[in-house]
Amino acid sequence: MKCLLSVCLTMLAGTAIFAVGGGRQALQKGISVQMARSSHASPMPEADRENAWIVTIAAGGQLYFGTDEVTADGLTEQMKIHPRERDARLYVKADSRAPFRSVRQVLRAARVDLFDEVVLLSSQPEAERPRTVVPPEGLEVWIGDEVASNLVTVQIEAGQQALKIKVNNDPIDSSALQSRLAQLFDNRTGRIVILKASGAVPYARVVQAIDASRAAGASRITMVVAPEV
């Protein structure tokens, strides 16, 4: 089956085939999001399977479990009542413009349903070419309890003029995040980043921080899913 548009979704025997163009990726029944771009994502072919668990977050923060719109509380209930394979993964497909508070609601629901990690699906550079079909890729993030020592904390806060980024409570420019992390990682046996972000931060900026952490050599990125106080 050929796509006549740069962004399309072909349904074949109930299986969603992802087709991407111009940074967009469509879902079943016309739901679409503009995913954040990543340069250090890993292939996630399992996200194309018919029974894959995918939670979508629209630009305005609306949540979808599969193709059904749900509330944050409703998502938790849907995840509890739907059976899943023991080793199944949760794929989060969020619009780059969505507020991080909506993404955090999904991560919190995943934690309640005993997921220790989730995959944040992302857009890749090759997806920018028209009529290009690319397999799903994503960034793995940990949402379980962190017991390791020698951790590095990255905090992103929404300011009045621009975002504020801190590494171990030291303010830095966003462009210096990767180099600062690489410096801190030098000669460390554990390279775990604890990533915190305020609810108003655009999701794309969180993905940029994850990407920078990966590029600096982080072995794991742990997202803080507790609500803001």
Image: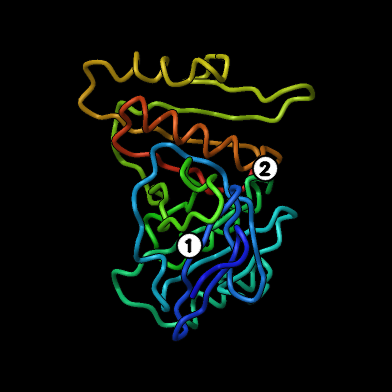
Q: Residue furthest bottom?
A: 13
- Badge 1 density bin: few <14, some 14–19, many ≥20, Cα 10 Å: many
Q: Secondary structure at mark 1?
A: helix
Q: Is residue 86 above or below residue 102?
A: below
CA–CA distance in space, label 2 to label 1: 18 Å
Q: Earlier in the sequence, mark 2 or mark 1?
A: 1
Instruction: Give percent across and percent down for residue 110.
Output: 48, 62
* Residue drawn at 41 percent across, 52 percent down: 137
Query: Which residue appears farthest toward the right when viewing the image?
Result: 160
Q: Residue at x 79, y 24 (%)?
A: 160
The residue labelled by disc 2 is 199
Residue 211 visible in the current orientation = yes
Check disc 2 and report its element: helix, strand or loop.
Answer: loop
Q: Quadrant of residue 115?
A: bottom left
In the figure, 106 relative to 222: above or below?
Answer: below
Q: On the rendered image, what quadrant is the C terminus found in?
A: top right
Could you tell whether 221 is left or right of 205 in the image?
left
Residue 153 is drawn in which quadrant?
Answer: top left
In this rendered view, identify the residue nearer to me: 66 or 109.
66
Q: Nearer the viewer, residue 149 or 28?
A: 28
Report the side of 117 relative to 175 (left or right): left
Q: Which residue is mark 1?
A: 110
Of 226 and 43, nearer the camera is 43
Three-letter amino acid code of the residue under disc 2: Gly
- Residue 60 x/y as whole percent: 75, 54
Tag 1: residue type?
A: Ala
Residue visible at 29% across and 69% down in the picture: 87
